[in-house]
Amino acid sequence: MAKQSTDVVKFSDVKLAWLQTFICVSKLQSYTRAGEHLGIDQSEVSRRVAALGKWFGGPLLTKTRPPRLTPHGQLARQIAEDTLWALCNFNNALNRSIAKAALSPQDEECLNALKVVWLDQGGQA
């Protein structure tokens, strides 16, 4: 049975900062330390992790101290790490292409705009 339009995953709704924050909390096992590391307050850390959990369809971390990955969170963390790794590789490849190619100023401007769309659009929550 074909998916209806309401079932379409909207990747534009996910912020890269949510992924980064979630990974940070899961590694440091603390919302407070993650906030200190990222330069944001604990309530913003909680908001970002909750938003990502809602997008993924379930809680990603337990409510215990320290917070632990739920089974859903284990899968989400792997996906988040893979996604950020792929975007970093994409950025590096673009930078190498720009450095190697004799691009016109218009071509370079276009590639830089593409980098902004991919890397910076979702970077701030």
Image (tube, rainbow, N blue to C red):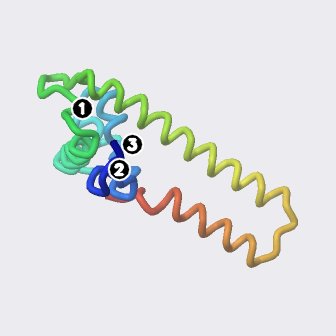
Q: Is residue 30 above or below residue 97?
A: above
Amino acid found under the numbered disc labelled 1 = Leu
Image coords of residue 99 (percent x, y)? 80, 58
Res 32 → quadrant: top left
N-term mark: 1 or 2: 2
Q: Is residue 119 left or right of residue 2?
A: right
Disc marking residue 20: 3
Task: Report, in whole angstroms, how far the alpha carbon at label 1 lies from the one at label 2.
Answer: 18 Å
Which residue lies under the disc numbered 1? 60
Q: Is residue 11 above or below residue 36?
A: below
Q: Residue at x 37, y 43 (%)?
A: 19
Amino acid found under the numbered disc labelled 3 = Gln
Amino acid found under the numbered disc labelled 2 = Val
User: SS of the residue at dot 1?
Assistant: loop
User: SS of the residue at dot 2?
Assistant: loop
Image coords of residue 13 (percent x, y)? 33, 57
N-term mark: 2 or 3: 2
The quarter of the picture where the N terminus appears is top left
Q: Is residue 100 left or right of residue 32?
A: right
Q: Residue at x 12, y 23 (%)?
A: 64
